[in-house]
Image (cartoon, rainbow, N blue to C red):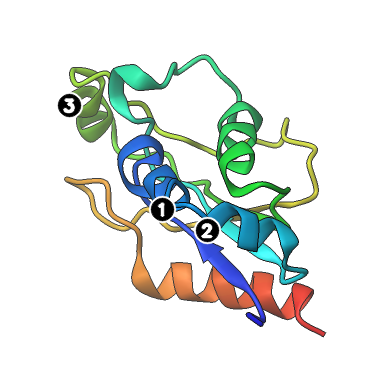
Amino acid sequence: SADIFIVGPGNLYSSVLPNFLPTGISEAMAQSTAPIVYVMNLLTDGRAMSQKEPLTHWVAIAESYVGRSFSRIIVNRIKPPAAISNAYRKEGKYPLLWTPAIKDKRFIPADVWCEPTIARHDPAALTWAITYAATQLIK
């Protein structure tokens, strides 16, 4: 009976997907008609995610666990400072960034990276992006 589902943000493999492993969760979401907004993480999950895969690849993995397509996908469009990018690269983590090459209209680019020294979503910007997505989806 949900009006909308919000999935994420978080590490795809250790924070997001485990929520759909208990029996009945993904089945219930697949049967629901409520829209789903997916908030992409700011970084790849280290060595578990290739930096070369397009964002749509990671969305498809998440959708396979949820059991249906996402209605909207919020993705960061702020390139982090070089120093922080280099530090994360040593851990095998790379920024997940929206680019104009993404033609999937479900993607909502948002300026959600807020810290100059650590990967962290800006709460106000993320609230705006989720609210924007929800107003498009809930009639």
- Cα–Cα span, label 3 and label 1: 29 Å
Q: Nearer the viewer, residue 99 or 21?
A: 21
The answer to whether mark 3 and mark 1 are in CB contact below 8 A is no
Which quadrant holds the C terminus? bottom right
* Amino acid bearing label 1: Asn
Q: Is residue 100 visible?
A: yes
Please give the label number shown on residue 25: 2
* Disc 2 to disc 1, C-alpha distance: 8 Å
* Residue 134 image position (x, y, % from top left): 67, 76
Name the residue located 58 percent from the left edge and 32 percent from the top edge. 61
Q: Is residue 3 left or right of residue 114?
A: right
Q: Which mark is residue 87?
A: 3
The image shows a total of numbered marks equal to 3
Identify which residue is drawn at 64% across, 61% down: 29
Which of 75 and 83 lies nearest the eye of the viewer?
75
Q: Which residue is mark 1?
A: 19
User: Which is more N-terminal, label 1 or label 2?
Assistant: 1
Secondary structure, mark 3, is helix
Q: Around disc 2, counting alpha carbons within 10 Å, would you say few (fewer than 14), some (14 to 19), or many (20 or more)? A: some
Q: Which is more foreground, mark 3 or mark 2?
A: 2
Write down the quadrant of residue 112 in the picture: bottom left
Residue 48's spot in the image, x, y percent? Answer: 35, 20
- Secondary structure at numbered mark 2: helix
Indicate whether 137 appears above or below 102: below
